[in-house]
Amino acid sequence: MNTTVDNGLGWLGIVRLGLVQTALGAIVVLTTSTMNRVMVVELALPAMLPGALVAMHYAIQMLRPRLGYGSDVGGRRTPWIIGGMAVLALGGICASMATALMASHLGAGIALAVVSFLMIGVGVGAAGTSLLTLLAKQVAPGRRGAAATIVWMMMIVGFIITAATVGHFLDPFTPMRLVAITSCVATIAFVLTLLAVRGVESRPGAIASAAAAAAPGDPRNAQAFRDALAEVWGDPRARRFTIFVFISMLAFSAQDLILEPFAGMVFGYSVGESTKLAGVQNGGVLLGMMLVAVATTLGRRGRRFGSLAAWTVGGCISSAIALSLLVVAGHVGGEWPLKPTVFFLGASNGAFAVAAIGSMMALAGDGPPSREGIRMGLWGASQAIAFGAGGFAGAMLCDLIRAATGSVVTGYTTVFAIEAVLFIVAAVLAARIGMTATAAARQGAHCDTADAGNGFKAGLDGGFAPGLNGR
C-alpha cells in the first residue's frame, strides 16, 4: 500500500524541509572541517586523530535502520528529526569543548571528543533518515528528483554560510571563542529545525498518511526490530538496492582524498591551483544536480529522459567515463585538459548522486507498509559506511601501489581505474533492478487498481520503478 500524499508538499514546503539539511550541514562542517584543522594545526596533534573521530561518526550510523524503525513504529517523523537535531547540536557543542580541552588535558579532551562524535553520528542518522523518509512520504512523485536536489544543495549552502561566517568570527583564534561560536551555530540550527518542521505532519493529508502507516492495531508494529530488519533484508529488491548504494557510493567517495594530490604531483599544480580545481569539480556537481532537477520535474510522464532510473544509470556510466579519462590524463601528463575532465567528473557525480537519493525517496514506500523508515535507514547506513571507507581506502590503496611500483602515476591511475569499474558494476546493478521493476509493474497492471496500481504509481512516476528496492 502506498502512503504517499497525493497532492504532496508544495515547493515552499520542500524548501522548508531543506532548511533542516542546511542546519545539519552547518553543524557537521564545523566538526569535520574547522575542528579538524584546529586539532592538526593549532594543537599540533596527529592527523589520524580527527580522521579516526570522523570515521567513528560514520561507523555509528550503522544504527540508521534501528532509528528508522523507531519512526516507523511511531508513525511520525517530526519527533525523530527534532530529537536527532538536538543530539547533533549537543554533540557539536561538546566536540568544541573537547577540542578546547585537548590544549590542556589531552586525554580528557580525546575521551570527550569520542563521545561527542558518536553523538554527532547518531544525531545525523536520526535526523537525516527521518527527514528523507518524511520527504518520501510527503513529496509528489514527479517532484522527487527536484526535491533531492533542493535538499542536497541547501546542505551545501549550510556548509558555505557557516564556513564563511565562522571563519570571520574565529579570528583571532582562541579555544573559548570556538566553543562560543559553535554553541551559537548549534542553537540557531536547532531553532531553524523547529521552525522548518512545524506543522508539516499536521496537514490533513499527512495525518491520514501517518495513521495509515502506523495504525495502533497493526500487529506488524509489535514486531521486534530484528524481525523487521530481516523482513526488509529478505526482500531481494531491497537487498540489491542496498548493495548498489554501497558500491556506487564507495566509487563516489574514493577520489575525495587523492584528486588534489594527483593534480599537484602529476600536473604540477600549486596548492592554490589544486584548491581552485576542487571548486571546478564542485561547480560541475551543482550543474549535474540542477540538470536532474529540471529533467525529472519537466520531463513528461513515461519519458525516459525524465526518469530517475535513467539519470542514475547514466550518471554511473558517465562517472566511469570521466574516471577513465583521468587514467589517460595521468599517462599523457601536462598536455591533457585536466580542468574540463574534472568538471565533467563533477557533473557526472552530481547527476548520479542526486538521482540516487531521489530514487531512495521514491522507493522508500515500496513493499509492506510501516517500513519506509527502516528501508531508508538501511540504505543510509550503507551509504555512510561506503563514505567512511571510500576516502580512506582510496588513499591507502594509492600509497600501497606507489610503494610497490615506484610510480606516482600508476598509484593514482590504478585507483581511478578501480573506481571506474565500480561505477560500471553499479550501473549494471541499477539497470537490472530497473528491468525487474518494469516486469513487476506489468504484472501489477493486472491487479486491482485500488490496491496494486497506487502502489506502483509512485515508483514509476518517480523514475525508478518499485523494483529498485529489490542505495
Image (cartoon, rainbow, N blue to C red):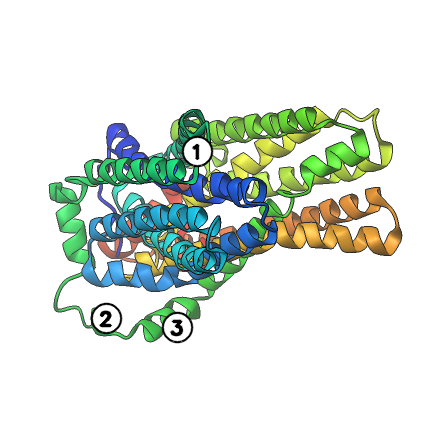
Q: Amino acid at mark 3?
A: Ala
Q: Disc 3 on helix, strand or loop?
A: helix
Q: Which residue is mark 2?
A: 220
Whichever of callouts 2 and 1 sits on the residue coming sooner in the sequence is 1
Check disc 1 and give the amino acid type.
Phe
Rendered position, 111 above or below 77: below
Residue mark closest to the camera, 3 vs 1: 1
Residue under numbered circle 3: 230
The residue that appears at 46% across and 51% down in the rendered structure is 104
Q: Amino acid at mark 2?
A: Arg
Disc 2 to disc 1, C-alpha distance: 40 Å
Q: Could you say whether the residue bearing mark 2 is in a helix, strand or loop?
A: helix
Asked if disc 3 and disc 1 are in contact, CB closer than 8 Å, the reply is no
Viewer-nearest of discs 2 and 1: 1
Q: How packed is label 2: few (under 14 Cα within 10 Å), some, or many (20 or more)?
A: some
Residue 305, percent from left and from top: 50, 32
The image shows residue 106 at horizontal and vertical percentages of 49, 56
x then y, percent, for residue 190: 26, 41
In the rendering, which numbered label is found on residue 159? 1
